[in-house]
Amino acid sequence: MVVLNKIYTKTGDAGETALGNGARVAKHSMRVTAYGTVDEVNSIVGLARLHADGEIDAQLAMIQNDLFDLGADLCRPDMEKDADAEYQPLRVTMAQVERLESEIDGMNDALEPLRSFILPGGTPLAAYMHQCRTVSRRAERLSVELATMEAINPAAVKYLNRLSDWFFVAGRIANNGGKDDVLWVPGANR
């Protein structure tokens, strides 16, 4: 269990931070950048929830918890040493990815097929869903880049890939089931 009695520690004043295994790294390292961007997605989800209710709010709450799992996963290097760790490190699982896929399929079944690209916007919830989508795509790109440098959990990247799709479809649901989607009109302002 986490206990936070004192919020500031001064240990990061020189530009370093501790990873989940205790190793100290620069705050601008790719690993910290990747899980910091996951944290950014989570904060935007919190804003989106101000406009959500019912099932979509419950799903967003689950995603927020998953994003903390994902941050914990990404901040813990040395996956090959997991078995020897004092406690089992938290890793994202394929079951979490599959839950997103199931939710995407359920939402998508209620929507008409798209016949145009859509612009981010519409309702406040839809606009936040699109912001969540774009920042989760950035987190995915950073995680993929990290994976070229160090081993990371493949399920973490899959989760981020599905998550951005989830936000896209949820944005359509938030726009009156897609009826109020803002359609892109190619070359409209030439």
Image (tube, grey):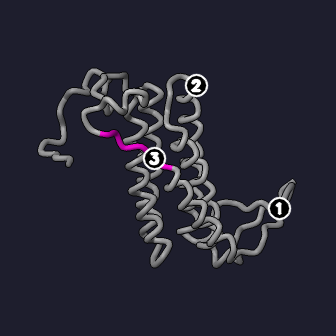
What amino acid type should be assigned to the residue bearing mark 3? Val
Mark 1 vs 2: CB contact within 8 A: no
Q: CA distance from mark 3 to mark 1?
A: 39 Å
Task: Looking at this view, name the residue that lies furthest to the left.
Answer: 5
**Extent of the magenta region:** 88-93
Q: Residue 166 vs residue 63: left or right?
A: right
The x, y position of residue 179, in whole percent, is 71, 77
Q: Which mark is residue 92?
A: 3
Front disc: 3 or 2: 3
Secondary structure mostly seen in magenta is loop
Mark 3 vs 2: CB contact within 8 A: no
Q: Residue 16 vs residue 176: left or right?
A: left
Q: CA distance from mark 1 to mark 2?
A: 38 Å
11 in relation to 120, above or below: above
The residue labelled by disc 2 is: 148
What amino acid type should be assigned to the residue bearing mark 2? Thr
The residue labelled by disc 1 is: 185
Q: Residue at x 60, y 48 (%)?
A: 161
Element under disc 3: loop
